[in-house]
């Protein structure tokens, strides 16, 4: 897949949106993902907001709840929001490296949102950013810079941390998958056992 010629847009991110993104990633023990709002920013783009939707998250993937996505779109439409601005997909690889996995590529293709901004991050605050176009021709611009806008007024980080933690506990179901030890079941994909685990009150540490 070839990158289109011409100037590559820069992707800026609003200060609060960036703080929320980092807290979502830092405070969730597993992978986590969500959507966001993008706005024109001169010749560049601005991620104006990032938010969380109901989902199931494991140490290897995250799955947004389809009904939660539909409910959000309906609510935006009812409130007169611009649905065309909802074209940011972000997710984390937790402690993993920054790259676009096969699952990521499949997710982007399945979304079919033109001019989609995708962001992947990890707990080391490393970020990857790309732009995908589906019309008139399929093209990907990878390696875009993600540039935070400074927060002139500042904000209460601890208050935001508590808000994000409460939101994670409400909307994210943590899933652990295990394969039974019985020899005859080890090679049977359907034998994988899946169970939920809660967010621990003492995790993650506050320092």
Image (cartoon, helix red, strand yellow):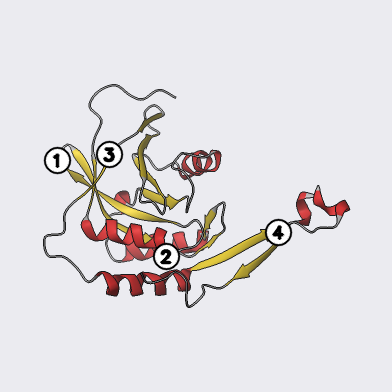
Q: Secondary structure at mark 4?
A: strand
Q: 136 above or below 26? A: above
**Residue 117 seen in render:** no
Which residue is denoted by mark 3 in the rendering? 145
**Could you tell whether 154 is left or right of 192 in the image?**
left
Between 91 and 97, the residue placed more toward the observer is 97
Q: Nearer the viewer, mark 1 or mark 2?
A: 2
If you read the primary sequence from the N terminus, does the residue marked by circle 3 or circle 4 appear first?
Answer: 3
Q: Residue at x 78, y 56 (%)?
A: 191
Viewer-nearest residue: 116 or 203:
203
Rendered position, 32 above or below 138? below
Q: Earlier in the sequence, mark 1 or mark 4?
A: 1
User: Can you identify the residue that label 4 sits on?
Assistant: 178
Q: Residue furthest bottom?
A: 201
Q: Earlier along the polypeptide chain: callout 3 or callout 1?
A: 1
Residue for badge 2: 27
Above or below: residue 25 compared with residue 99:
below
For discs 2 and 3, the disc positioned in front in the rendered view: 2
The residue located at (46%, 43%) in the rendering is 97
Q: How much space separates mark 3 and mark 4, taking CA atoms?
A: 38 Å
């Amino acid at each position: 897949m070839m990158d289109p010629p011409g100037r590559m847009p820069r992707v800026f991110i609003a200060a609060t949106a960036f703080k929320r993104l980092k807290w979502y990633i830092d405070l969730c023990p597993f992978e986590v993902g969500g959507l966001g709002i993008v706005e024109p920013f001169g010749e560049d783009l601005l991620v104006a907001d990032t938010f969380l939707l109901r989902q199931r998250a494991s140490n290897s993937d995250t799955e947004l709840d389809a009904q939660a996505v539909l409910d959000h779109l309906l609510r935006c439409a009812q409130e007169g929001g611009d649905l065309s601005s909802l074209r940011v997909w972000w997710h984390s690889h937790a402690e993993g490296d920054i790259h676009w996995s096969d699952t990521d590529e499949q997710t982007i293709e399945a979304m079919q949102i033109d001019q989609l901004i995708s962001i992947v991050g990890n707990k080391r605050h490393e970020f990857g950013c790309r732009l995908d176009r589906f019309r008139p021709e399929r093209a990907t611009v990878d390696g875009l810079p993600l540039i935070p806008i400074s927060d002139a007024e500042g904000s209460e980080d601890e208050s935001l941390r508590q808000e994000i933690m409460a939101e994670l506990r409400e909307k994210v179901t943590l899933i652990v998958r295990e394969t039974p030890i019985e020899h005859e079941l080890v090679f049977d994909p359907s034998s994988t056992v899946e169970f939920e685990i809660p967010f621990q009150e003492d995790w993650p540490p506050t320092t």
